């Protein structure tokens, strides 16, 4: 039997994934249409009030446009774009990872890898659906914060933000259940539990926290910009949340005594993440959750690990290593400080490159010598002599550990 051309085979796989509800995600790239600002088109399944839809996001240089279409309509539209407006496509579905490529002058190619751990699993899209309901788009404060329209759909350019907030809420729930089992079951906790959102910005995730947590928690957003603080306090007031959700202006000060049982810091810039972690550790917070971003501090000082010297001249590799080294060092320092850590992907990489969620659950007292060695050994790989969180914790990265007796 003759084999169908690559484009047709890819479209068949795509249509099956969209129609059978096994699509995890699709990315179209290499735009070749008339719009020079267009970069990508992303597709993922969503469950809306009207039923299953495929959420399509066109990413342009400075804006995003999202449309949610019924699966047959989405499949037709995507089929019309592939190989014409976009030359490349990556499809993740129940059948695996399929990559379609068209090179100008060359022949189209289709490469497929079977589904395996490490690739976005087809179940991801399915699992996303109930999670999305943790904070539906119709949540009233989401409209006041400019994320959704009154119909619950994201405003133009805000689909990624809504998805981020919903993923955050879904990821946080199991962590909260583990860290605060009694309080989450809404048993009287005896004392008000203090939550700090460090670098709360426009308050998207601070409001989400206040909604997820029972009234036994008091949530505070700490934010350097007074205008954002005033805005968030107004919205909290309007929604009758002021008794358990407040925002305060000022810079984070890890040396200040704060009462904090749960610390979050999402995309707090550069070393503000370290300030936040130090603040939480110092307060003995039960749970720390951070999504780091712009890890600039270590980059200029990072040495090439053994064997990587030949590629170290490439700035992008050094950049990626700086991100990894910063966050891995933070995770090891948290372990030393008595926290069991987890690292997860925050949300789809198509929504933000700042995609890592690092959490720490308090277990024991700090100071485990084995953990200290692990921190120093890791720091030595990259020649790291000092780092913000280590300084806050008074941890000397260069100290030589005593040899075991
Ligand atoms: C990228 S925004 C993230 C906002 C919010 N956490 C979110 O994820 O939507 C970072 C925010 O942290 C604030 N920020 C950065 N450094 C800070 C510091 N040292 N103290 C207080 N706020 C800080 C900035 O003003 C900004 O609003």
Image (cartoon, helix red, strand yellow):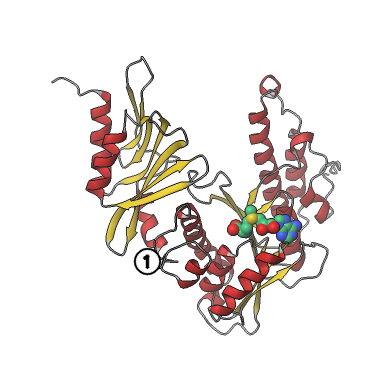
Q: In this rendered view, identify the residue nearer to me: 366 or 113.
A: 113
Q: Which residue is drawn at 70% across and 54% down?
A: 273
Q: Is residue 276 visible?
A: no
* Above or below, 16 relative to 53: above
Quadrant for residue 89, please give it.
top left
- Tell me the SS state at disc 1: loop
Quadrant for residue 308, please give it.
top right
Where's the C terminus, which quadrant?
A: top right
Residue 28 pos. (x, y %): 39, 35
Q: Residue at x 63, y 74 (%)?
A: 233
Please tell me how crowded label 1 is: few (under 14), some (14-19), or many (20+) other residues with Cα within 10 Å: few
* Above or below, 47 relative to 245: above
Where's the N terminus, which quadrant?
A: top left
Q: Which residue is drawn at 44% across and 37% down?
A: 38
Quadrant of the displayed image that contains ligand 1: bottom right
Residue 326 pos. (x, y %): 70, 43
Residue furthest top as drawn:
105
Residue furthest left as drawn:
1
Left or right of 301 on screen, residue 184: left
Residue designated by label 1:
151
Left or right of 311 on screen, residue 258: right
Q: Which residue is drawn at 15% across and 19% down?
A: 2
Residue 248 pos. (x, y %): 71, 71
């Amino acid at each position: 039997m003759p084999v169908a051309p690559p484009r047709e085979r890819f479209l068949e796989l795509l249509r099956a994934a969209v129609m059978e509800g096994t699509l995890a995600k699709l990315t179209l790239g290499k735009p070749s249409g008339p719009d020079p600002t267009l970069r990508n088109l992303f597709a993922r399944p969503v469950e809306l009030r009207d039923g299953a839809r495929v959420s399509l996001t066109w990413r342009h240089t400075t804006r995003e446009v999202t449309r949610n279409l019924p699966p047959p309509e989405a499949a037709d539209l995507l089929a019309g774009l592939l190989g014409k407006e976009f030359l490349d496509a990556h499809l993740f579905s129940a059948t695996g990872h399929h990559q379609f490529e068209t090179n100008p002058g060359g022949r189209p190619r289709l490469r497929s890898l079977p589904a395996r751990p490490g690739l976005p699993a087809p179940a991801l899209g399915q699992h996303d659906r109930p999670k999305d309901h943790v904070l539906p788009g119709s949540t009233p404060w989401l409209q006041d914060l400019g994320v959704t329209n009154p119909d619950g759909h994201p405003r133009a350019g805000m689909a990624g933000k809504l998805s981020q907030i919903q993923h955050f809420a879904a990821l946080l729930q199991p962590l909260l259940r583990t860290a605060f089992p009694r309080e989450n079951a809404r048993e009287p906790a005896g004392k008000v539990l203090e939550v700090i959102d460090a670098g709360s910005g426009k308050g998207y995730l601070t409001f989400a926290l206040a909604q997820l947590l029972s009234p036994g928690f008091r949530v505070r957003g700490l934010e350097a910009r007074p205008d954002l603080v005033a805005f968030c306090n107004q919205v909290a007031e309007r929604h009758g949340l002021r008794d358990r959700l407040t925002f305060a202006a000022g810079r984070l000060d890890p040396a200040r005594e704060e009462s904090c049982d749960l610390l979050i810091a999402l995309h707090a810039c550069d070393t503000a993440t370290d300030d936040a972690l130090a603040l939480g550790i110092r307060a003995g917070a039960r749970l720390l959750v951070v999504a780091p971003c712009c890890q600039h501090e270590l980059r200029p000082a990072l040495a090439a690990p053994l064997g990587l010297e030949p590629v170290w001249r490439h700035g992008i590799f050094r950049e990626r290593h700086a991100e990894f080294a910063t966050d891995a060092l933070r995770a090891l320092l948290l372990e030393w400080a008595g926290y069991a850590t987890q690292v997860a992907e925050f949300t789809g990489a198509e929504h933000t490159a700042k995609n890592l969620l690092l959490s720490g659950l308090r277990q024991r007292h700090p100071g485990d010598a084995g953990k200290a060695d692990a921190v120093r050994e890791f720091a030595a790989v990259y020649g790291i002599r000092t780092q913000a969180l280590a300084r806050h914790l008074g941890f000397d990265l260069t100290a030589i550990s005593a040899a075991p007796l």
